[in-house]
């Protein structure tokens, strides 16, 4: 059972017991995770307790919550009571266990979902490939010689492998959208501040988002709905009322444009074809360029490096040799970023936000590739894009960074293509998650978007 709402419906109807579903999920994880390496911990005892609670509620005739008995897992930067929050760092193996669940983990439990474990990631969320020196590489379920993307690579891989129908991840510069694209599943990066980050290990306060992965648009919407609410303990969470969405087709034709220029120049043939297919299906009549998208991406890099470097500077000073070798120099360089550069990057951010807001006066949804290429081989260092030789690990976020830079909501939708999976970004104005979810539902109903599940 790989669809969350179908699992919950069967349990609600008495066609399956939550304990049986969870036991099957745990057995599958035990058998198949070693080849993929997406889990950092399996919470079997907790999962069985939570499943028994669901079965007891049903036996008592109580109404079951919306995700009753659905197995899920979380990126290992969400606090899970009783476990050390590793955040992908070997230096945190001796950290004290979390005294309570992160707010979103608690909300998933309230919704009846059953936590089966925590998931691998790039160290401190700085990376796009989940090649982790302390906890190993997370491999793409569709070709285990290739990366799963990052930094939420464990989340994307766990859903793509069919080990869980739902997972939670985080996205600073593309860390939900990149694994969604490379693993062939649906992912939602909500508007900045929509979902609380309380109890999630931070990377870049002014850019961090959290959100779900799923195998269908309907499951994505259902998970997003239960995660909403006040942001206790998170100053970056906007105090907005819950705005529940459905995964139905929009009640009016969406005004859609495909992003070109920068988004075509660095796209592989497969990435460009995916965005064209999605745009055509959505009835896009226009192709437009976002002004200075390449500078927005560069400014996002500066802000990321500066804030991330400052956060970890003392650890770098004390433990440089034991810090993740794939990112320690980037963190250190970020800590040395001149303040004037950071200020200029923030000024460009305001300018870019205003220009893109003007674009949304004419369009509801913008379509762009989620990644420039499909999954690359583990260990690759360089890639040719747009006639340029670029560092691969940083370049997987080329198309995601200008969008999260200004906090826009995005669904990453997997497009039906030959060969390896690849996805598109369905980008909406701030606080209009309903629009990008409606666009995803349209693509899925038309057979253009479809998750790739299973090894």
Image: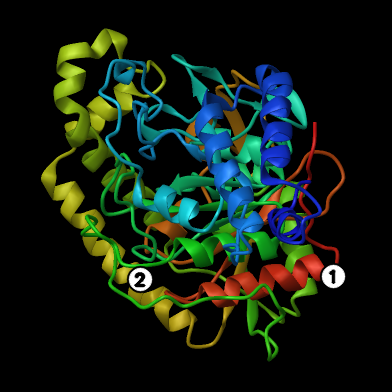
**Which quadrant would the C terminus be assigned to in this image?**
top right
Q: Nearer the viewer, residue 399 or 119?
A: 119
User: Sequence order check: which comes first, mark 1 or mark 2?
Assistant: 2
Which residue appears at 46% of the width and 14% of the height? 133
Residue 19 percent across, percent down from the top left = 67, 39
Q: Is residue 241 left or right of residue 12?
A: left
Location of residue 276 (image quadrant)? bottom right
Q: Is residue 278 above or below residue 171?
A: below
Circle 1: element type: loop
Q: Nearer the viewer, residue 168 or 67?
A: 67
Q: Is residue 247 above or below residue 140?
A: below
Which residue appears at 35% of the width and 68% of the height? 352
Which residue appears at 48% of the width and 36% of the height? 151
Q: Provide the residue designation for mark 2.
A: 353
Q: Is residue 164 left or right of residue 454?
A: left
Q: Provide the residue designation for mark 1.
A: 446
Asked whether residue 49 is in view, the answer is: yes
Circle 2: element type: helix
Residue 222 percent across, percent down from the top left = 60, 64
Q: Residue furthest bottom?
A: 252
Q: Is residue 111 above or below residue 280?
A: above
Q: Nearer the viewer, mark 1 or mark 2?
A: 1
Location of residue 421 (image quadrant)? top right
């Amino acid at each position: 059972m790989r669809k969350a709402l179908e699992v919950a419906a069967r349990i609600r109807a008495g066609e399956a017991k939550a304990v049986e579903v969870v036991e099957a999920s745990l057995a599958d994880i035990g058998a198949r995770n070693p080849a993929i390496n997406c889990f950092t911990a399996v919470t079997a005892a907790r999962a069985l307790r939570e499943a028994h609670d669901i079965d007891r509620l049903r036996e008592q005739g109580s109404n079951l919550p919306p995700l009753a008995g659905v197995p899920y897992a979380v990126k290992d930067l969400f606090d899970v009571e009783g476990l050390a929050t590793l955040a992908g760092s070997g230096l945190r193996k001796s950290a004290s266990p979390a005294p309570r669940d992160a707010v979103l983990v608690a909300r998933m439990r309230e919704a009846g979902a059953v936590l089966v474990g925590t998931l691998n990631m790039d160290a401190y969320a700085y990376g796009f490939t989940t090649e982790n020196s302390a906890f190993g590489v997370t491999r793409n379920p569709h070709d285990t010689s290739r990366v799963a993307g990052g930094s939420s690579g464990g989340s994307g891989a766990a859903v793509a492998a069919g080990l869980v129908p739902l997972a939670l991840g985080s996205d600073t510069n593309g860390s939900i959208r990149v694994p969604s694209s490379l693993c062939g599943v649906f992912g939602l990066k909500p508007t900045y501040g929509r979902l609380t980050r309380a109890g999630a290990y931070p990377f870049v306060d002014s850019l961090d988002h959290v959100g779900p992965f799923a195998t269908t648009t309907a499951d994505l919407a259902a998970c997003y709905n239960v995660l909403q609410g006040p942001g206790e303990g998170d100053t970056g969470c906007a105090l907005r009322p819950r705005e529940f969405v459905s995964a139905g087709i929009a009640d009016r034709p969406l005004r859609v444009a495909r992003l070109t220029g920068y988004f075509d120049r660095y796209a592989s043939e497969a990435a460009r074809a995916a965005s064209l297919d999605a745009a055509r299906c959505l009835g896009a009549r226009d192709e437009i360029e976002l002004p200075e998208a390449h500078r927005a991406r560069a400014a996002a890099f500066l802000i990321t490096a500066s804030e991330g470097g400052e956060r970890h500077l003392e650890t770098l000073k004390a433990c440089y040799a034991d810090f993740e070798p794939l990112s320690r120099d980037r963190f250190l360089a970020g800590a040395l970023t001149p303040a004037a550069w950071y200020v200029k990057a923030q000024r460009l951010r305001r300018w870019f936000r205003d220009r893109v807001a003007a674009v949304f006066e004419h369009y509801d949804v913008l379509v762009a590739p989620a990644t420039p290429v499909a999954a690359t081989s583990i260990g690759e260092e360089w890639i040719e894009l747009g006639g340029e030789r670029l560092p691969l690990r940083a370049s997987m976020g080329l198309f995601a960074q200008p969008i999260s830079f200004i906090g826009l909501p995005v669904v990453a939708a997997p497009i039906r293509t030959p060969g390896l999976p690849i996805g598109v970004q369905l980008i909406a104005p701030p606080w209009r998650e309903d629009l990008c979810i409606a666009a995803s539902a349209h693509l899925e109903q038309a057979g253009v978007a479809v998750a790739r599940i299973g090894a």
